[in-house]
Amino acid sequence: MLEVFGEEIWTVEGPTVTGAAGFQYPTRMVIIRLSHGELVVWSPIALTRDLREVVERLGIVRHLVPPNSLHHVFLGEWQSAFPDAVVYAPPGLPEKRPDIRFDVDFGEQPIAAWAGEIEHAVIRGNRITTEVALFHRGSRTAVFGDLIQHLPRGWFRGWRAVVARLDLMTADAPAVPRKFRAAFRDRRVARDAISPVLAWPTDKVIIAHGQPVTANGQAFLHQTFQWLLR
């Protein structure tokens, strides 16, 4: 269930969820333990009793982090289970989920509760969603929700398989899907937004929909966003 990914960082595979037009996606949650023992739960997946027991053995759940306005299906049940946890709001999600209490809006300033351990970047200017990417310094790991995807060939069937192939969701290597590329209204704004991400000393990259990159992460990110930098 819980897999060690690096120093004080774990991943958990979740159930498949159905998105727009019936496209189904695998889910992946990331847990980061801060130096004082508090847990950051990124992109919460379905909360089962077994999962809760495993997570609580790691530490105290204090931070619930949806990466964008698309990853929110299970957020409410985590807030109900851990009412004292701070819930962070990527742009656009509070309007979409008025039933959830959001405590902190993601902006350009560092988050004081994890300063020096986790950095974030708000990647603005996209019409589909505004992604908030994280960087965990202890494991030198960057974490992305939907902006980078890599699903295996055969994951989708029929016309969805054709769309996924054309969209680069099932390309030979992880990529920014073409729909997200086209949804950036202003390339200059997009380049400014991704600039701090490319400067992170990244070794590894976790993506919600695809296998992680386990080496040469900074070079991987530069290659993945080469279309934007040209």
Image: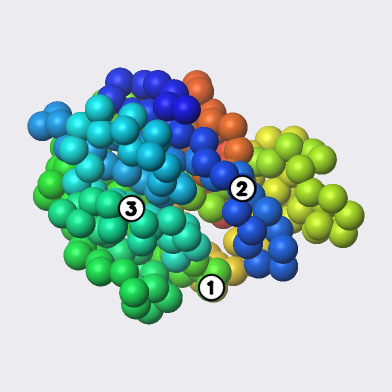
Residue at 64% in and 58% down: 18
Q: Earlier in the sequence, mark 1 or mark 2?
A: 2
Q: Few, some or many C-alpha atoms within 10 Å of disc 1 (few <14, some 14-19, many ≥20)? A: few
> Does residue 9 appear left or right of residue 74 in this picture?
left
Residue at 72% in and 68% down: 21
- Mark 2 residue type: Thr
Q: x and y percent of residue 90 in the render?
A: 35, 63
Q: Earlier in the sequence, mark 2 or mark 3?
A: 2
Which numbered marker is on residue 140?
none
Q: Is residue 85 above or below residue 12?
A: below
**What residue did someone put label 1 on?**
127
Q: x and y percent of residue 5 in the render?
A: 41, 23
Q: Few, some or many C-alpha atoms within 10 Å of disc 2 (few <14, some 14-19, many ≥20)? A: few
**What residue did someone put label 2 on?**
16
> Does residue 164 appear left or right of residue 200 in this picture?
right
Q: Is residue 176 above or below residue 183?
A: above
Q: Residue 204 appears in which quarter of the rendering?
A: top left
Residue at 47% in and 28% down: 1
Q: Few, some or many C-alpha atoms within 10 Å of disc 3 (few <14, some 14-19, many ≥20)? A: some
